[in-house]
Image (cartoon, grey):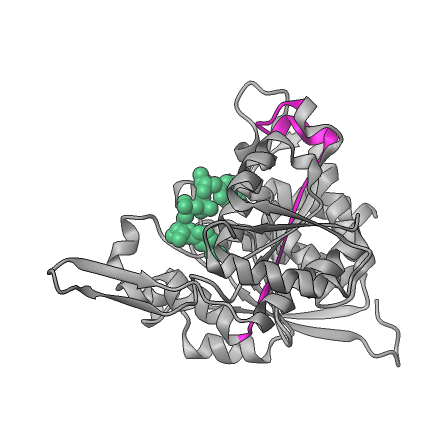
Amino acid sequence: MAMAGLVMNSYKIVLLDGDGIGPEIMTEAVKILHLVASRNDVEFELVHASFGASAYFELGHPFPDATKALCDEADAILKGPIGLSHEESKKIPVDMQPERGALLPLRRRYNTFANIRPVFLPKGLAHFSPLKPEIIGDGIDFIIIRELVGGLYFGKKEAGVNAQGKRYVIESLEYDEDQIAAIARVAFETAQKRKRVLHNIHKSNVLRSSVLWNEVMMEVAADYPDVEVVHILVDAAATYLCLNPGQFDVMVMENMFGDILSDQAGGILGSLGLMPSACLGPDKAYYEPSHGSAPDIAGKNIANPYSMIGSVAMMLEMSFGMEQESKNLWQAMQSVFAQGNSTPDLSKPGDDVKMISTQAFGDLVAEELAKL
Ligand code: NAD
């Protein structure tokens, strides 16, 4: 409760509910934001805005101007997943489809070049993972740092018909040294706060882009002599994630490698529903689950909102400096699972768990947080 005369911190948060399970898991995140505001010296102005396929169908554009204006003014953006099933997405022209028409423009607009994806499963929850307990050991705990505004997803594109009458496409994997140095610094600074080992993921045996990536990575490394750099080819890294995830602490990689390996990381935890993320730019950050809109389970109250509530925990720490409340929130989420509960993505019928809904997970997290 704010005391008379004291200035209360006030933040405007734009909520992009998104598609599929987006609105369901956003509801649980909003529940937590209200609770956080009620027990801290902080005020959140929450504004919903249209984004994604739903925005396209309602307003004719997946990232409408009104949403852009709200995001421009926001202190932080909390984004739900967007997208449609493969079949449904054909109802939208290619350039208006949610990733091309909304997500990439959002990232470009705020230059959110640093995507931070924590991959965490304590030993006590090893039963959620498809990996054997002996591989999980003391638990899974590492961070994927993915460059988010360069590479193939943002490079020049060309498609047409060639002189032989064949359809062709060209997409370029583009980086300049400043882009690589910027994400390298984020990675080294993160490693300095953890175990001081940085796994640099690349494909320099084939890709020229990775040769430059590695060169710049090692130039930046000179400023962080206390951090050991370990180079791993991306294909080998995919294997090690399954065979020995314990070797990783901080991993850094370019955009598409990070897209793919972080989904694999969700897989070794047991579900993408355990994958929150932060997307940080120089002036603005947005927070989103790493996964998509899960159309296969939308509207059933069975999606795991951990990824969305975890994104709130990251926002509290990274955008609002509320470290302690962020820690409390992580602890509350872990306690819900530690008490024997599971969302349906993490367990199967017959497992020794109490299966709970999306809404129940949010309620229980709120209950646990209120105790801390
Ligand atoms: P997806 O990540 O939506 O789902 C993959 C699998 O994980 C599905 O079985 C789904 O049910 C499950 N899953 C994902 N999140 C879950 C959660 N919170 N709780 C429980 N289970 C969960 O991937 P997809 O099916 O390939 O893509 C669906 C749509 O999402 C596509 O249109 C895709 O383009 C889009 N997408 C958007 C983003 C984003 O908004 N950042 C990211 C990835 C994919």
Is residue 138 shown above or below 86? above
Is residue 81 shown above or below 234? below
Quadrant of the rendered image containing residue 337: top right
Name the residue: 53% across, 34% down: 345
33 vs 69, nearest the viewer: 69
Is residue 233 shown above or below 74? above
Image position, residue 146 (x, y; %): 58, 57
85 vs 46, nearest the viewer: 85
Q: Is residue 297 visible?
A: yes
Image quadrant holding the N terminus, namely bottom right
Image position, residue 191 (x, y; %): 75, 54
Name the residue: 50% across, 66% down: 150
Q: Is residue 168 left or right of residue 226?
A: left
Q: Is residue 163 left or right of residue 144?
A: left
Q: Is residue 343 visible?
A: no
Image position, residue 83 (x, y; %): 39, 55
Quadrant of the rendered image containing residue 2: bottom right
Looking at this rendering, what residue extends furthest in the left direction?
Answer: 165
Image position, residue 310 (x, y; %): 65, 51
Tell me where the magenta segment starts and ends, as one range. Answer: 110-133
Name the residue: 72% across, 33% down: 139
